[in-house]
Image (tube, rainbow, N blue to C red):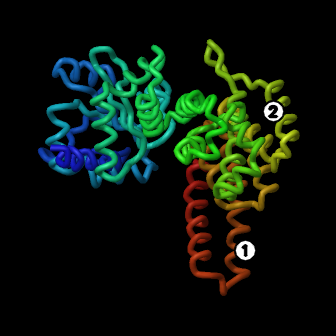
């Protein structure tokens, strides 16, 4: 039975992926998972159907550009055995997170990565659990089975809030939070679990692995302990991996200073950031100026200050080697999130200039390594497609 469920679930995860003219292709009639279409059926209607049929509501949160989403639809949800597994258990619906009601649901359920699969209890209209990303069949099925058998992530949230702290429970909770892409909460739980065990990180591989995988706060006692004893940890563990971990935390932590107020507005705690800069200087953190600039970019994007964001992107790219990877990805964020025509036109001009530079790179070195040439040619095609969208 377990193997059967595993196979079915694999299909399920991979199922999020095919594209209809607007998004995904449904499985052939009578075979795979029968998805309701979020373009024609509302969340409320799907919820009512699930409640009426005494089933759970399964939501495929996808975007049209998400490769893994398409893979899930094509290779998983299209399978008969997955359809047979889903039919008696779920009412299934798919929503494009960048169009229609999907925009509201993305905020409601705080969907940040794709594909995300939500399982909703229609009786309470609450999220039971979620799975983020595709995976191998056995691992994906195991995650679904574990989550639902335990009552879902929401049940674990409630138990943790009520004070459950047994080792077995906390480790399972961290694993579940990680699978759900709840990195902030996962980090908080890991921090709390490691509190008082900091000195054991040097001798306990499992605790050190937890630190490396889940701790994200530059304020946590475990992080500061490792920073203060970096020489000892570098001698015991892989120094390069440790340095990457510490630098990643230093770089990402300032995002916490962007706070959402009760009215929904986002306010940046500049005083907190100033203190953080002093802390980084105290510990001789590398690339502090770059961290500050990257934080400014993040704040501008989240506050949808697109003219500022574009100028900061240009500045960052100029200071960091004019990477085509960065240019394309920053421009892509503007194309997807910005409606300001002036900013879109300016972004298109920036891409056109970058495209000319890229063409010159290809012409200057006719003997260029084939792999590198292929990569640059790929960016050339991507630039052209994005410019066309921004120039509309």
Q: Nearer the viewer, residue 343 or 202?
A: 202
* Front-most of residues 163 and 148: 163
In this rendering, would 279 be left or right of 111? right
Tag 1's secondary structure?
helix
| Residue at 68% across, 72% down | 359
**Residue at 61% across, 76% down:** 373
Mark 1, residues whose alpha carbon is within 10 Å: few (<14), some, or many (≥20)?
few
Quadrant of image for the N terminus = top left
Helix, strand or loop status at disc 2: helix
**Nearer-the-camera pick, 252 or 383:** 252
Alpha-carbon span between mark 2 and mark 1: 42 Å
Q: Is residue 62 left or right of residue 232?
A: left
- In the picture of the structure, the residue carrying the numbered disc 2 is 276
Residue under label 1: 360
Nearer-N-terminus badge (2/1): 2
Residue 20 seen: no
């Amino acid at each position: 039975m377990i193997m059967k469920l595993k196979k079915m679930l694999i299909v399920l995860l991979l199922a999020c992926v095919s594209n209809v003219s607007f998004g995904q292709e449904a499985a052939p009639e009578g075979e795979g998972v029968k998805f309701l279409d979020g373009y024609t059926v509302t969340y409320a209607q799907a919820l009512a159907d699930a409640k009426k049929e005494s089933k759970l509501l399964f939501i495929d949160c996808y975007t049209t550009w998400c490769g893994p989403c398409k893979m899930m639809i094509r290779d998983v949800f299209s399978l008969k055995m997955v359809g047979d597994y889903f039919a008696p258990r779920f009412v299934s619906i798919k929503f494009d997170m960048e169009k229609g009601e999907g925009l509201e649901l993305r905020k409601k359920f705080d969907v940040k990565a794709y594909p995300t699969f939500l399982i909703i209890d229609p009786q309470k209209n609450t999220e039971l659990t979620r799975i983020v990303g595709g995976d191998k069949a056995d691992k994906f099925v195991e995650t679904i089975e574990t989550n639902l058998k335990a009552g879902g992530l929401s049940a674990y949230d409630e138990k943790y809030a009520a004070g459950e702290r047994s080792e077995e429970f906390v480790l399972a909770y961290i694993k579940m939070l990680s699978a759900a892409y709840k990195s902030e909460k996962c980090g908080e739980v890991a921090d709390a679990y490691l509190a008082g065990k900091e000195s054991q990180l040097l001798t306990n591989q499992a605790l050190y692995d937890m630190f490396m995988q889940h701790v994200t706060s530059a304020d946590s006692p475990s992080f500061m302990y490792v920073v203060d004893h970096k020489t000892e940890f570098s001698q015991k563990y892989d120094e390069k991996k440790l340095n990457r971990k510490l630098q990643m935390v230093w770089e990402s932590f300032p995002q916490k200073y962007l706070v959402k107020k009760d009215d929904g507005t986002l306010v940046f705690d500049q005083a907190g950031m100033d203190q953080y800069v002093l802390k980084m200087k105290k510990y001789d953190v590398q690339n502090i100026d770059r961290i500050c600039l990257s934080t400014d970019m993040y704040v501008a994007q989240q506050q949808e200050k697109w003219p500022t964001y574009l100028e900061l992107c240009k500045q960052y790219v100029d200071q960091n080697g004019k990477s085509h990877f960065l240019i394309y990805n920053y421009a892509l964020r503007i194309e997807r999130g910005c409606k300001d025509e002036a900013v879109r036109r300016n972004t298109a001009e920036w891409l056109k200039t970058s495209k000319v530079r890229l063409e010159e790179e290809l012409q200057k070195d006719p003997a260029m390594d084939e792999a590198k040439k292929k990569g640059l040619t790929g960016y050339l095609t991507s630039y052209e497609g994005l410019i066309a969208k921004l120039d509309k």
